[in-house]
Image (spheres, coloured by chain):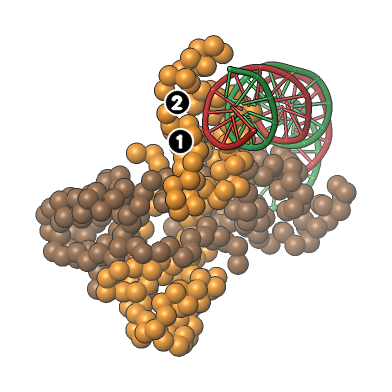
Chain colours: A orange, B brown, C red, D green
Amino acid sequence: MHSEHVASRSADQKDSSRESRNGNGTPQLDAVSLAIIEQLQEDGRRPYAAIGKAVGLSEAAVRQRVQKLLDQGVMQIVAVTDPLTVGFRRQAMVGINVEGDVESIADALTAMSEVEYVVMTAGSFDILAEIVCEDDDHLLDVINKRIRALPSVRSTESFVYLKLKKQTYMWGTR
Amino acid sequence: MHSEHVASRSADQKDSSRESRNGNGTPQLDAVSLAIIEQLQEDGRRPYAAIGKAVGLSEAAVRQRVQKLLDQGVMQIVAVTDPLTVGFRRQAMVGINVEGDVESIADALTAMSEVEYVVMTAGSFDILAEIVCEDDDHLLDVINKRIRALPSVRSTESFVYLKLKKQTYMWGTR
DNA sequence: CCGGGAGGTGCGGATTTCGCAGAAGTGATG
DNA sequence: CATCACTTCTGCGAAATCCGCACCTCCCGG
């Protein structure tokens, strides 16, 4: 089992195992790390030994790689919940148009705890922000009193969520 | 230590500890389960004993509750990654307008692996869908060949992501 | 008053995690 | 080509964690 592993490693991992950086600063992941991530996307608490068996690595090696991936910020292992069952009954996506510095407005949105998601986009909105609230009053308050109150927010358009159909965390599994 | 715990339980947990269902079918969470979820949102691999100490419960009790929350689908413990570092360089939100049955279109989108997120909304779009792709060609293919090709899709509008500013998983932590 | 169910506790034994020392591969340097 | 520095993997024990189980307590309905 051991020598077999060594053999397979030199055979199909050699070319992809150099962990370089692709110019940006984002770590380049090899096939084994991808496989580890896939395992942890199925079950974030899966034991290192089980992952090792699946990807062909020792328990200790998996542990080191996972720790490194966490340290580098490539992935995080967290509990994710359905907002509805945790008491947040109103959600909305808000499209925002800005005059002037888009990034500073994005930063202001990021600072709001009700704002779950902020992305700068190309298209008829400068920013899309997802809002998670307890009820309609709360949502109204956030959109009208806090977002529209920001200087240089030109206009907003809201899309209240009626039904969430899909929400996956399966990046890298294709 | 033991009697102290019992005392605190009867004092501040009695009223919120009944795990009923709120009419819908969504389980009603008490304060202790919320606290457990918060712990696991900070670190999905935190040991049960440490969680127990933080929320005032034994290791075994925490384990049972976590298992139940997972079984019920209230939460899942998973690895989440930054799409960019995993090789997906193009993302976009697509607003879609439909003539006829919105839900069947939403189901069709849900079936596509490149579609990460599907939500039915009130507002000037019937559906918002988030697309995660490897490159521009891939994105173009998904939007023009696959989404627009769906019957009864009246129109689409794309918002290509320029910069992701915030992405949290901190529901229930407020 | 007496089940019955839900949820907690404590306790061992099996597993897993953790830290560390040694081996092996790679690239740079003289 | 020898060697050094660096990274990553492996193989241990020891410590900590997970897991199943038996028993207890509380609460509610018959």
Q: Residue at x 43, y 19 (%)?
A: A11
Question: Hey, which quadrant is residue B7 in on the image?
Answer: bottom right
Q: Nearer the viewer, residue B157 or B109?
A: B157
The image shows residue B40, relative to residue A144, as above or below, that is above
Q: Badges 2 and 1: C-beta atoms under 8 Å apart?
A: yes
Q: Residue at x 27, y 46 (%)?
A: B112
Dot 2 corresponds to which residue? Answer: A13
Dot 1 corresponds to which residue? Answer: A30
Q: Is residue B9 left or right of residue A115?
A: right
Q: Is residue B12 left or right of residue A37?
A: right
Residue B111 x, y percent position in the rendering: 27, 45
Q: Earlier in the sequence, mark 2 or mark 1?
A: 2
Residue B13 x, y percent position in the rendering: 72, 59
Question: Hey, which quadrant is residue A140 in on the image?
Answer: bottom left
Residue B60 x, y percent position in the rendering: 71, 39
How far apart marks 2 and 1 lie (CA) works out to: 8 Å
Chain of the residue under label 2: A
Kind of residue sitting beneath label 1: Asp
Establish whether labels 2 and 1 are both on one chain. Answer: yes
Q: Residue at x 52, y 64 (%)?
A: A87
